[in-house]
Amino acid sequence: MRKKKKVSESYTIMTELVLPNDTNTLHNLMGGRMMHWMDIVSAIAAQKHSNRIVVTASVDNVSFRESIKLGNVVSLEAQVTRAFNSSMEVHIKVYAEDIPAGRKVKTNEAFFTFVAVDQMGSPIDVPEAVPETENEKALYDGALQRRQLRLILAGRMKPHDAEELKAIFNLQE
Ligand SMILES: CC(C)(COP(=O)(O)OP(=O)(O)OC[C@H]1O[C@@H](n2cnc3c(N)ncnc32)[C@H](O)[C@@H]1OP(=O)(O)O)[C@@H](O)C(=O)NCCC(=O)NCCS
């Protein structure tokens, strides 16, 4: 029988201080540096869930709501939302904190997908992910539709095979 793990077991938090080398000429955190940190924290969450080596399979839309300033403390929180066969969707939330000003805001949110691989780099099945809280259950439920959308965009699924998406758009055959 397939092993089960609570999604909360994958919870990972990473904290970084924005230093001059992380910024652009406006002294704001560079988008690329942020995505690098997002990739690392979410890969660790996927590793915790699978106890395997994982590779990034895809990155969903990452938008930058507000700039993060030099000297801010950035906290990145990641947790697996759902596991499929060898792949896992990870939700990442990013917060920027200006400690002297006592201000902390959520600046980014994204979903990354990781695939667990064996020593030969071949996909290998991972444990089922079990959500417990209302928020975890909502993320778990939505993961199937997000998976279908990203597989269509990656050219790995035909739109007419995406049953979950057809249901939300109320599409008829
Ligand atoms: C990701 C990878 C392991 C998939 O291998 P593959 O031989 O295509 O394997 P499969 O077609 O059997 O797919 C394996 C899983 O990956 C998922 N997957 C593949 N491409 C995906 C994509 N673009 N988005 C989301 N999931 C994807 C599949 O849905 C499948 O999930 P499941 O097992 O949970 O059903 C392979 O493409 C790879 O190694 N890519 C390079 C990864 C890498 O180097 N990442 C870092 C780059 S910056």
Image (cartoon, rainbow, N blue to C red):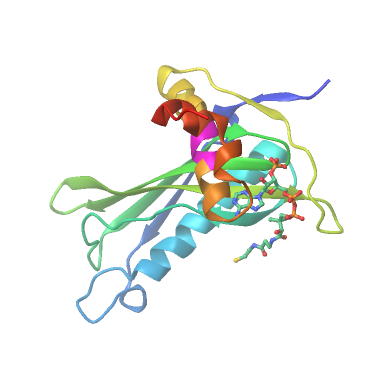
Query: Bounds of the magenta span?
Result: 143-148
Please tell me whether residue 145 belongs to the stretch shown in magenta. yes
- Horizontal arrangement in the rendering, residue 74 relative to residue 54 (left or right): left
- Horizontal arrangement in the rendering, residue 149 relative to residue 168 (left or right): right
Name the foreground residue: 71 vs 33: 33
State the predominant SS element of the stretch in magenta.
helix
- Horizontal arrangement in the rendering, residue 11 relative to residue 97 (left or right): right
Name the foreground residue: 87 vs 68: 87
The residue depicted at 41 percent of the width and 26 percent of the height is 170
Instruction: Residue at the far right: name it.
Output: 120
Give the percent coordinates (x, y) of residue 153: 52, 53
Q: Above or below — where is 172 with respect to 97?
A: above
Give the percent coordinates (x, y) of residue 92: 44, 45
Quadrant of the image for the N terminus?
top right
The residue depicted at 61 percent of the width and 37 percent of the height is 161
Q: Above or below — where is 131 with respect to 48?
A: above
Please tell me whether residue 85 belongs to the stretch shown in magenta. no
